[in-house]
Image (cartoon, grey):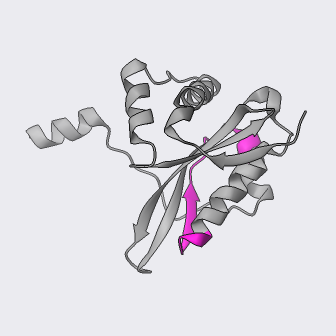
Amino acid sequence: MAPVTVRRAMTADGEALIRLIRGLADYEHLTGPDAAAAERIVADLDRRYTAWLAETNGRAIGYAITFETYSTFRGLPKLYLEDIFVEPGARSTGAGFALFCIVVEEAVSRGCDALEWEALDWNQLALDFYARVGGEHSKEWLPYRLGREGMERLLES
């Protein structure tokens, strides 16, 4: 396989980005974005989040999406890695490592105190990768979520 390059995604990359997001959804056994969601994802690029594409021979084979959060205790920004994905046929090319490194560079350049992300407990490939790059699994912080229906139910009560 040709060398992997990583660059910041632009709105013109919307089709490739959506294709990769759907690839991640398939990998995670989830439903990918429908047409309306895909349209919002492309419209929100660089407004609500930043995306990077890993490419080889001019074809996008992986992506990463981040957005900034803030640590009130440290008084510093943090970068949250929402997605990182490389197509199965392009794994072991260094694309995932290259994407992760560009995200780390972005966090450092923004003066972030930390880079944070989550991984599915069954995704051993991801867990092994994060261990190799020095990621630390937080034992004291538990993720919580209140979905749209839960938010609406709460506001109605």
Residue at the spot 40% in from the left edge and 50% down from the top edge: 144
Residue 150 position in % (x across, y down): 25, 37
Q: Is residue 70 left or right of residue 83?
A: left
Residue nearer the viewer, 137 or 95: 95
Please determine whether, in this image, residue 70 is positioned above or below residue 151.
below
Q: Is residue 100 visible?
A: yes
Please determine whether, in this image, residue 135 is positioned above or below residue 127.
below
Residue nearer the viewer, 86 or 153: 86
Please determine whether, in this image, residue 134 is positioned above or below residue 151.
below
Residue 115 position in % (x across, y down): 58, 63
Q: Is residue 85 visible?
A: no
Residue at the spot 37% in from the left edge and 75% down from the top edge: 72
Q: Is residue 106 left or right of residue 92?
A: left
Magenta stretch contains residue 110: yes
Q: Quadrant of residue 132?
A: bottom right
Residue at the limit of the structure toward the left, as seen here = 157
Residue nearer the viewer, 121 or 21: 21
Residue at the spot 40% in from the left edge and 79% down from the top edge: 73
Q: Quadrant of the N terminus?
A: top right
Q: Which residues are magenta?
A: 108-127
Q: Is residue 112 left or right of residue 156?
A: right
Residue 37 position in % (x across, y down): 39, 27
